[in-house]
Image (tube, grey):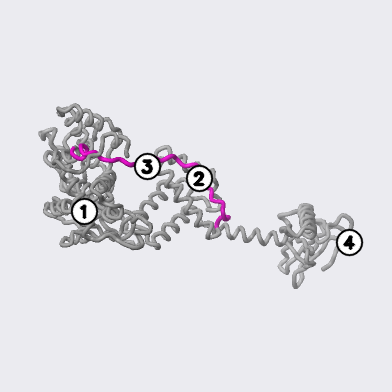
Amino acid sequence: MPTTAKPLTKRGVDAMTPGARDQFHWEGGDGAVKGFGVKVTPAGRKSFVFQYDDANSVSRRVTIGTYGALTVDQAREAARQLAAQARAARQDPTRLDPATARVQAKRATAARHATPTVRELGARYVDRLQQRGKSLETIRQYRGILERHVGPAIGALKVSDVTRRDVAALHEAISAAAPTMANRAINMLSAMLTMAEREEWRPAGQNPCRAVEKNPERRRQRVLAEAEYRAIGAALARIEAKGFGRVKGLDERATRTAEAPRRQRGTPADTQALTPHQARALQLFRFLALSGWRESEGRTLRWSEITWERAIATLPETKTGRSVRPLGRAALAVLERVRAMPQDGGGASSEYVFPAAASRQPDIGEGRERRTPRTGHARRLWRAVWAVAQDELRRMAGEATDPGEAHALRALVAVEDTVEQHDLRHGFATTGRELGAGDHVIAQLIGHATPRGMTARYGGVPEAIVRRFADEISATIAARLDAKPTGAAVIPIERARRGL
């Protein structure tokens, strides 16, 4: 390893010749940087290097760059900086010497390349939830959030690069149209980034979602008054008899399905024949009111899940897992009515009790396709039903002879909150409490998470009690829908308006 008597120059480097093995030529003389030299390989490749002793007196060597890409003066200046770094590392154990710093930088680069993007992390997160038994409905919702919101906005970012500013911008963008959905998206993203911390793709304790202020949410507690039940029942009967017709403020497209053509010329304006799917959708709404089920549970109910002799339905996938639901006589009567209905125009039968215009969707986890009723169709039809029910409320208010009753009905008409399908579930639970059913009974009937506590661990509710309340609650609501007098307590108008 020869050392030149003077600093390296371009002419001197050009004159260096290769040998049988690597040759090292070290700079010397006045102004030289100790440890700075040139390496010449047997193939003639020349590169600048710097050699030094670390804090443990171990000789270390780093490559500065290739001759030609760097001039001698540029390489010497780089060597001078490396020498200062090595000297600082010997004096301060907390500092890194040049070789150690490069090793750690290479590891960090490799780790960064191995770090997934937000879109890839989302796919892994959802797959892990599915493996742990999350319901298919929840999995679909999460994938929808990823595909519609998170993916387009920050899906291409590396997980380690996501900042609070990125999360805040995502939340603000979604909030412009859907404030509650924006909160749900941030909750999901926060769980994903917590998973990334466990996998060491992000530093621990630096989840940027925690610093984002979420939108205020008002928990929906709409309670149906008895008059609203009567109006809904009258609306269902009116639509069953005359069809949807021209519902005020409702586009005709909202009630038309793939198998329902436009109203033919010459057909009365207040008449529009129901399609088989629409007729079943009306029965779905009545069933939801009499059972307290979630809309998605009723919409995807299969005939094979009903045990008629025991008056129960066994749902394999719900928000709370597998669920066995006792059915009241009035709810079971709706299912009997649907079973007696003719099939659709093509004569094809469906595995679903309440099939809507079906669409082909992937069967999660199995790579197959199956036909599932579309959510949007049933919800559009429900908006039409509620529009007719509001007309019925106004008619009832106009025909009321008792001043107190008329005032109460007008107050209901003035309530701005639209009754949604999920409010039928709230109404079922409230009616159960009016009739004296405990939370454990109601939880079993509607498939809600069972209340926890001492009594939950040491005892259950006898099946006879649950079945009795299933019959009583469904019968009470059926009587309200059919405008029959009932001895059950009536919720005051003020409570309905306040949503208590």
- Judged by depth in the image, the label closer to the viewer, 3 or 2, is 3
Quarter of the image where one finds residue 372: bottom left
Disc 4 to disc 2: CB gap under 8 Å? no
Question: Mark 1 or 4 closer to N-term?
Answer: 4
Tell me residue 74's x, y (percent).
Answer: 76, 52
Most frequent secondary structure within the magenta stretch: loop
Q: Report how far apart the C-alphas of labels 3 and 2 lie in the structure.
A: 24 Å
Disc 3 to disc 2: CB gap under 8 Å? no
Q: From the viewer's perspective, is residue 65 above or below residue 58?
A: above
Q: In the image, which disc is placed on residue 470?
A: 1
Question: Mark 1 or 2 closer to N-term?
Answer: 2
- Judged by depth in the image, the label closer to the viewer, 4 or 2, is 2
Q: Secondary structure at mark 2?
A: helix
Q: Quick one: label 1, few (<14), some, or many (20+) residues within 10 Å?
A: many
- Judged by depth in the image, the label closer to the viewer, 1 or 2, is 1
Q: In the image, which disc is placed on residue 219?
A: 3
Disc 1 to disc 3: CB gap under 8 Å? no
Q: Report how far apart the C-alphas of labels 4 and 2 lie in the structure.
A: 61 Å
Circle 3: residue type: Arg
Q: Quick one: label 2, few (<14), some, or many (20+) residues within 10 Å?
A: many
Q: In the image, which disc is placed on residue 167?
A: 2
Pointer 4 residue: 5
Q: Report how far apart the C-alphas of labels 1 and 2 lie in the structure.
A: 46 Å
Question: Mark 4 or 2 closer to N-term?
Answer: 4
Q: Quick one: label 4, few (<14), some, or many (20+) residues within 10 Å?
A: few
For this rendering, which residue is in front, 255 or 359? 255
Q: Secondary structure at mark 1?
A: helix
Determine the residue positioned at 20% across, 43% down: 488
Which region is colored magenta? 201-230
For this rendering, which residue is in front, 196 or 496? 496
- Judged by depth in the image, the label closer to the viewer, 1 or 4, is 1
Q: Quick one: label 3, few (<14), some, or many (20+) residues within 10 Å?
A: few
